[in-house]
Image (tube, rainbow, N blue to C red):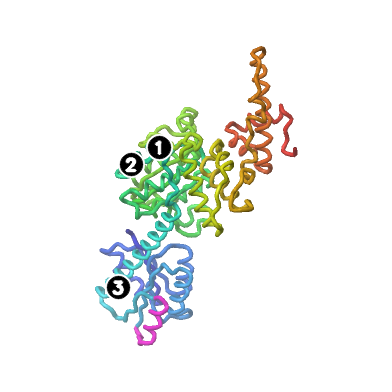
Amino acid sequence: MSYRLLIVDDEKNMCRSLEILLEGEHGYKTSSVTSAQEALKLIEKSEFDLVITDLTMPGMSGMELLKTVKEKHPAIQVIMMTAYSTVQSAIEAIKMGAYDYIMKPFSDDEFLLSVKKALEVSELRNENVVLKELLDDKEKQKNIFVAKSAVMKEIMFKVEKVTATPSNVLMTGESGTGKEVVARLLHQMSPSSKSRFFAINCASIPETLLESELFGHEKGSFSGAVKTKKGKFELAPDGVIFLDEIGEMPLPLQSKLLRVIETKTFERLGGLEPISFSSRIIAATNKDLQSLVKEGKFRDDLFYRLNVVNINIPPLRERKDDIPEFIDLFIKSKSAELGIKQKQLSPEARERLLNYAFPGNVRELSNIIESALIVSRGNIIKANELPLLKHEVSVDELGSGTKIEIENGFQKAEELKTKLEVELIKEAVKVYPKNSNDQIAKTLGTTRRVVEARMKNYNISKNQ
């Protein structure tokens, strides 16, 4: 690992001597300034692992610098240097968070040993932060994966097989099916489970910022880049990069990602120095990437690089055996989150959920349970207290239970279809009155053009 060190001393010769010593055989990257004020400005612009500062300097003292650094950047280690040591000042510096307090003149070996140990502490603390994040993440994710149905048991089997390899994985399936949950489970079961897991939504970040988010950037590489920033590939060198909605990644960035996968190296935006990585890439999409390849919207070579192992997560309506498990799980977890007593579903409410198509999949079921727990009046959630099911269209209400004569049967079927479409669109408009037609189309499983054409034909407006 390449550490960044900042030397602060009002004597330029001292700064230069320490730079030469640290950059020599140890290969540390160093910067130096001659005042505490300059040091604080530089720390705001760049990332440092260790600050080595003199105690007595004109203007702001080393002790004041230590106090400010520890308040604003507690992860940065600080070593104090002084030619005028007192027991009291040493104790005060250590109390304020300094890692070490060394007397000038000091030997090279003494100084380098202090630096080495300070960086080891920095690395250990970083690992502890990552471990805490992982433990917190595991606590949130535990029991979320449900594999009661045969198809999910098969997916679980495939996940177990993949964990032992570093192969890239492509997760496919509708929105809300739990692709990220499965990706996190795969990571937690792998040998590198203590490494970091980063999830990036490729559709929600602008192209330039997405490249910076993935690969980092150098200071000044674009407007607003006021300091050097490490990207997710650099922060998780042997972890997992989860690229959600990979089908939305712009073509120029697809090309760069392809090269990164092929060479196992990348450069920060605006940088020239290659950085190695060995992260596993798990991509996810709710789109047909092969169709996008044919349309020229997705690179075929990148598709094959990502699709080493394909895990397709079926929609919830195709794995109904999982629904009761999810219901019980969400009642328990959501009750805990909301700080309320656990409730039960009435037989009618449970039956209604079991027969519902769940266009929003597991995510929709989770929201339904949370809403029902909040709005229900007693300890039993009734069928009419499932507010997010109000847009569900009853087939019986549309007359499908009525006997249809064979004569002109197709015409009557078309009339029934038209009535069904009208009701579906009206209900979708009620559910998403302020959303774009894109959301309505996505919910109904069609395109915006089709929705707008049907709304025009059936004289349906959002003001109804």
User: Left or right: 45 with respect to 436?
Assistant: left
Q: Answer yes or no: do the residues labelled 2 and 1 have beta carbons within 8 Å?
A: yes
The answer to whether 138 is drawn above or below residue 99 in the figure is above
Mark closer to the chain start, 2 or 3 = 3
What is the total number of numbered labels drawn onto the structure image?
3
Front in this rendered view, residue 362 or 171: 362
Mark closer to the chain start, 2 or 1 = 2
Q: Answer yes or no: do the residues labelled 1 and 3 have beta carbons within 8 Å?
A: no
* Residue 172 location (% of width, % of height): 45, 37
Q: Residue at x 46, y 76 (%)?
A: 67
Front in this rendered view, residue 233 or 195: 195
Residue 383 visible:
yes
The magenta region covers 83-97
How packed mark 1 is, by other alpha carbons closer than 10 Å (few <14, some 14-19, many 20 or more), is many
User: Left or right: 321 with respect to 413?
Assistant: left
Dominant SS in magenta: helix
Residue 453 visible:
no
How packed mark 2 is, by other alpha carbons closer than 10 Å (few <14, some 14-19, many 20 or more), is some
* Whole-number angstrom distance, CA of label 1 to CA of label 3: 49 Å
* Whole-number angstrom distance, CA of label 2 to CA of label 3: 43 Å
Look at mark 2 in the image and give the residue it sits on: 162
Type of amino acid under label 1? Ile
* Whole-number angstrom distance, CA of label 2 to CA of label 1: 10 Å
Q: Secondary structure at mark 1?
A: strand
Quarter of the rendering containing residue 160? top left
Look at mark 1 in the image and give the residue it sits on: 311
Type of amino acid under label 3? Ser
Q: Residue at x 69, y 31 (%)?
A: 455
Closer to the observer: label 1 or label 3?
1
Look at mark 3 in the image and give the residue it sits on: 114
Q: Where does the C terminus fall, quadrant-wise? A: top right
Quarter of the rendering containing residue 128? bottom left
